[in-house]
Amino acid sequence: MADGNDAVERAELLLSLRKRGMRDHMVMSAFERVPRERFVEPAFRPFAWNDQALPIDCGQTISQPAVIALITDALELRAAHTVLEVGTGSGYHAAILAHIVKKVVTVERFHTLASTAQARLHQLGLSNVEVLVADGTFGCPPRAPFDRIVVNAAVREVPAALFEQLAPDGVLIAPVGPPEETQRLMRYAKTSDGVVQRDLGPVRFVPLLPGVATVL
């Protein structure tokens, strides 16, 4: 349970998200219900409700809440959707998504991160999330197609396999650009006339790496 300081900081963060234009009731409700302090390392828990990215294991990060809110809002989620998340990380974004949609399939290349995230999600009773250790560049063909796909790591271009696994009228969001520089958060909507792109703004993400990590 969050202490008094957490409750105040959580309220301030939610207010800041509303001021940024986040109006979707399901998205805001999910942010209210998911305890971010459960997804950060103990040393960083005093900063859990700050609007900032924080380091986690394996050289990865838990993204800034405002960025997660922007992505989640732009996905235009519905309760019946199945979502593929590439890059589980701490499991925080998967938890947000799980409060909105029917099913979340999340893939992670680091065994350590996948097992920790799975434990956190289980403790929160989120049984509609499936955590898999896999190469995210290939998506998850056995579970395809997906109504929505979100990539939580930078790519120079979106892997073709992910577009192939996106359902008709589906939406894919990914940070696109050089991993060592600022990327553009791109939204791709698959329509009967082709793929429609929209630039959601600048972001900084760690790179999406191929393969499954053999050490961590």
Image (cartoon, grey):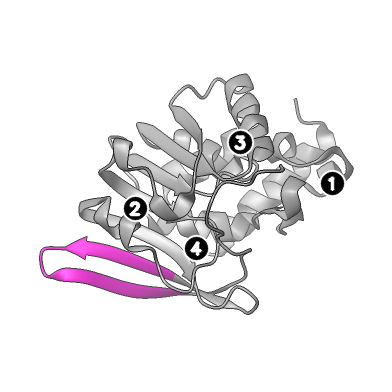
Per the image, the residue denoted by label 3 is: 114
Foreground disc of the pair 2, 4: 2
Check disc 3: other Cα within 10 Å, few if <14, some if 14-19, many if 20+.
many
User: Number of callouts in the render?
Assistant: 4
- Mark number for residue 72? none
The quadrant in which residue 137 appears is bottom left
Residue 50 can be seen, yes or no: no
Extreme-front residue of the structure: 214
Q: Is residue 215 left or right of residue 43?
A: left
- Mark number for residue 76? 2
Residue 164 can be seen, yes or no: yes
Name the residue located 42 percent from the left edge and 50 percent from the top edge: 24
Nearest the eye: 76 or 163: 163
The quadrant of the picture occupied by the C terminus is: top right
- Mark number for residue 21? 4
The quadrant in which residue 164 appears is bottom left
Q: Which is more N-terminal, label 2 or label 3? A: 2
Q: Please, what is the three-letter code of the amino acid marked with disc 3?
A: Ala
Q: Please, what is the three-letter code of the amino acid marked with disc 4?
A: Gly
